[in-house]
């Protein structure tokens, strides 16, 4: 009985928004994304990835210029699953992928569990974007995604 009451209270709180934070849009998150904070989040990635221009692949590929480049485009031995995933690493695809890599691309080599916090994903994407010869305007890219372009 106690569990039923607790579940009912949680359901009501979810419906009326008690205790819940406003979920930011992709555009809102990228407008305030902080590459310096993303660099700190990237420390979780350093064991497997390099980010310097011309850096070597490790367990995973080098991530210099990752934002906006084709998936599986680096000199690296990608899994068949990642090759089949294809496309381009747009801000929205990176956001979804970094939340749960093994769910988004089952069978890929990346063992990282992901980044649950949306602000961590926005910050790391801002950091990745900064490490590029041609950084994108993340706010404009996110706005274009949300506008369906």
Image (spheres, rainbow, N blue to C red):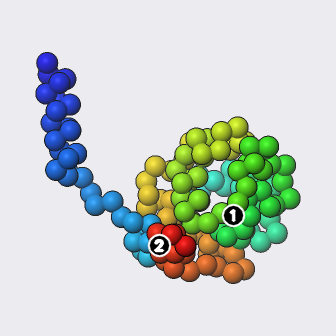
Q: Residue at x 77, y 56 (%)?
A: 72
Question: In the displayed structure, does residue 105 sit left or right of residue 53?
Answer: left
Question: In the displayed structure, does residue 83 sit left or right of residue 9?
Answer: right
* Structural crowding at the residue carrying mark 2, measured as other residues with C-alpha within 10 Å and reported as few (<14), some (14–19) or many (≥20): few
Q: Which residue is drawn at 59% across and 59% down?
A: 94
* Structural crowding at the residue carrying mark 1, measured as other residues with C-alpha within 10 Å and reported as few (<14), some (14–19) or many (≥20): some
Look at the image and tell me in which quarter the N terminus lies. Answer: top left
Q: Position of residue 124 (x, y in %)?
A: 55, 63
Secondary structure of residue under mark 1: loop
Nearest-to-viewer mark from 2 and 1:
2
Q: Is residue 30 above or below residue 8?
A: below
Query: Does the image show residue 112?
Result: no
Secondary structure of residue under mark 2: loop
Query: Does the image show residue 5?
Result: yes
Q: Find the residue positioned furthest to the top.
A: 1
Rendered image quadrant of residue 135: bottom right
Rendered image quadrant of residue 81: top right
Q: What is the distance, in whole Å, between disc 2 and disc 1 at their CAs?
A: 18 Å
Q: Position of residue 86 (x, y in %)?
A: 73, 55
Residue identified by numbered label 2:
147
Q: Residue 43 carries which label?
A: none
Point out the tag, 2 or 1, that comes first from the N-terminus: 1
Q: Is residue 131 above or below residue 42?
A: below
Q: Which of 55 and 92 is in front in this view?
A: 92
Q: Which residue is drawn at 52% across and 75% down?
A: 144
Q: Nearer the viewer, residue 137 or 120?
A: 137
Residue identified by numbered label 1:
88
Look at the image and tell me in which quarter the C terminus lies. Answer: bottom right
User: Pointers 2 and 1 in contact (CB under 8 A)?
Assistant: no
Q: Position of residue 44 (x, y in %)?
A: 59, 52
Q: Where is residue 140 in the image (x, y as percent from the top left)?
A: 51, 79
Q: Residue at x 16, y 41 (%)?
A: 12
């Amino acid at each position: 009985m106690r569990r039923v009451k607790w579940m009912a209270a949680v359901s009501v709180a979810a419906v009326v928004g008690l205790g819940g934070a406003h979920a930011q849009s992709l555009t809102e998150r990228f407008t305030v994304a902080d590459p310096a904070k993303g660099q700190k989040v990237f420390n979780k990635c350093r064991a497997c990835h390099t980010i310097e221009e011309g850096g070597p692949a490790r367990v995973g590929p080098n991530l210099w210029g990752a934002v906006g480049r084709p998936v599986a485009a680096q000199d690296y031995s990608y899994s068949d699953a990642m090759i089949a995933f294809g496309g381009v690493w747009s801000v929205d695809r990176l956001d979804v992928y970094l939340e749960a890599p093994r769910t988004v691309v089952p069978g890929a080599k990346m063992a990282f569990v992901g980044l649950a916090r949306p602000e961590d994903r926005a910050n790391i994407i801002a950091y990745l974007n900064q490490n590029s010869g041609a950084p994108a305007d993340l706010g404009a890219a996110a706005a274009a995604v949300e506008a369906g372009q």
